[in-house]
Image (tube, grey):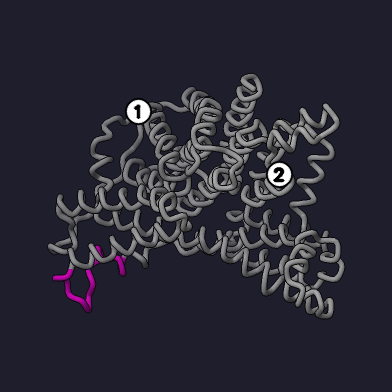
């Protein structure tokens, strides 16, 4: 069953990659894959769990469960612990995504983004690509790569008509968003994990990884700049619909834009102050905007709600993207519970035993599976070293190796870079990529043919810069 789980995951991943040729929505493939791998795990629990470290840790802290028959121990561990724990983590991402998508869609419905798009005068493809990528890079550091990607891809629909041009721009936005999130403690979920865990500190991670992240974005941008030419074709103006409550006023556009952006910017502040998960701050912002739009449009016929009210906007949210996230993250969670990812991390340490190679390998892997469990595995394998703990190590070589794992050590900084940017190599490898894929219906094979090598060039160039600086 242990091997069968990997086989099913690979087959499901292939079905997701071949979504367009198969004409089967990737969300459906992801959901079926996730269910099957969990079924295989619980059916094969007697072979898989006895040697599982997570299982024995669970029994150690739950002596009552340890006294039960083994079959019931497996059920308690998987059903009442692992699934609930993973569902909590996945739900945080899903509610965050749903809230962000709803806020952005509300701003868009009120034509708030026109205030920005009307000020972008350039039609030159190269100039526009650099402008949007740089804007994405810094926005991602302030917000996070997922929220920024949702905002910027929504903007693209207001700027570019041709689908393949939008795909190219959206793909470069994914690279820029992941690069921008890697150097900020709040820009990516993995850097947030390392920051909260104490592996990195705010100023050190910014100084330590900013240059590499910038290189990661600039290299692909420079290459693409020599590959594209001409001007973009702007989309047609939407037809105006009669009715005072259907067409937003200039005041309403500005109010929704500033309130929506303010709600998104509020999330990292909320988390820092309250220490509550980011999705709670996102839902608070959504609630405030919901109340505000209901008040703004309270004169509309309540039985025939205005399309500007949030209840109407909710119907436009891309539900398949939410289900796709649920399926793929749940499937990866099953592999984590079964011990596949921990086994992989241990294998890398045993065979490579070099912080640069280990981190680079984790970056490559993060383009295939979610980077969160990979980083969590690294954090679990390597405790934060202190001068006192290093002094207790007798072997000089081992002592020197341990210095890489002190707070703000080279391993943790480089891990933030590789895990944060490696996901750009494949569009399914990061939350930003999955969001762009869902919103723009980007084809997996198209991305792999046109963008993967570009993302890889930036990833390796940034890694080289870090190695030379280190």
Q: Nearest the camera: 309 or 240? A: 309
Q: Quadrant of residue 400?
A: top right
55 left or right, relative to 113:
right
**Given contact means CB atoms under 8 Å apart, are the residues at marks 2 and 1 in contact?**
no
- Which x, y percent locates residue 395? 85, 30
Q: Is residue 243 visible?
A: yes
Q: Which residue is mark 1?
A: 124
The disc, 2 or 1, on the residue closer to the chain's N-terminal end is 1
> Residue 288, which numbered label?
none
* Range of residues picked out in magenta: 298-312
Q: Residue at x 56, y 36 (%)?
A: 451
236 left or right, relative to 385:
left
Residue at disc 1, secondary structure: loop
> Residue 383, which numbered label?
2
296 left or right, relative to 212:
left
Residue at disc 2, secondary structure: loop
- Which x, y percent locates residue 208? 55, 28
Q: Is residue 360 visible?
A: no
């Amino acid at each position: 069953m242990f091997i069968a789980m990997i086989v099913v995951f690979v087959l499901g991943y292939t079905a997701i990659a071949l979504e367009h040729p198969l004409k089967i929505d990737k969300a459906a493939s992801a959901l079926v894959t996730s269910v099957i791998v969990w079924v295989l795990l619980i059916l094969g629990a007697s072979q898989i769990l006895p040697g599982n470290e997570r299982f024995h840790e669970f029994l150690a802290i739950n002596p009552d469960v340890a006294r039960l028959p083994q079959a019931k121990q497996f059920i308690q561990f998987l059903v009442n612990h692992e699934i609930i724990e993973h569902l909590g983590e996945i739900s945080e991402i899903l509610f965050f995504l749903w809230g962000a998508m709803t806020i952005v869609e509300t701003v868009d419905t009120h034509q708030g983004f026109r205030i920005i798009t009307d000020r972008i005068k350039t039609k030159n493809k190269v100039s526009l690509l650099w402008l949007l990528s740089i804007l994405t890079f810094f926005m991602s550091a302030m917000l996070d790569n997922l929220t920024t990607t949702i905002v910027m891809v929504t903007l693209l629909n207001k700027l570019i008509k041709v689908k393949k041009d939008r795909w190219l721009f959206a793909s470069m936005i994914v690279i820029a968003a992941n690069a921008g999130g890697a150097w900020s403690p709040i820009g990516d979920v993995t850097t947030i994990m390392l920051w909260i865990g104490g592996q990195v500190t705010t100023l050190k991670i910014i100084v330590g990884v900013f240059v590499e992240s910038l290189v990661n974005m600039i290299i692909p941008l420079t290459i693409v700049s020599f590959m594209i030419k001409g001007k973009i074709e702007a989309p047609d103006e939407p037809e105006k619909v009669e009715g005072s409550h259907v067409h937003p006023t200039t005041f309403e556009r500005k109010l929704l834009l500033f309130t929506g952006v303010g709600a998104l910017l509020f999330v990292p502040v909320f988390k820092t102050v309250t220490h509550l998960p980011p999705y709670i701050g996102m839902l608070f912002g959504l609630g405030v905007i919901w109340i505000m739009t209901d008040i703004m449009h309270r004169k509309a016929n309540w039985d025939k709600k205005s399309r500007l009210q949030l209840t109407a906007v909710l119907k436009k949210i891309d539900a398949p993207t939410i289900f796709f996230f649920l399926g793929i993250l749940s499937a990866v969670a099953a592999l984590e519970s079964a011990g596949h990812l921990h086994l992989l991390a241990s294998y890398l340490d045993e065979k490579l035993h070099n912080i640069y190679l280990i981190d680079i390998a984790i970056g490559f892997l993060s383009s295939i599976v979610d980077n969160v469990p990979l980083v969590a595995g690294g954090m679990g394998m390597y405790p934060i070293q202190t001068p006192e703990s290093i002094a207790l190590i007798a072997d000089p070589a081992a002592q020197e190796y341990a210095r890489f794992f002190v707070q703000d050590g080279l391993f943790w900084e480089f891990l933030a870079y590789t895990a944060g940017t490696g996901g750009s190599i494949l569009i399914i490898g990061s939350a930003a990529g999955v969001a762009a894929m869902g919103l723009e219906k980007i084809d997996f094979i198209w991305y792999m043919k046109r963008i993967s090598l570009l993302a890889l060039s930036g990833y390796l160039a940034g890694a080289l810069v870090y190695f030379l600086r280190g």
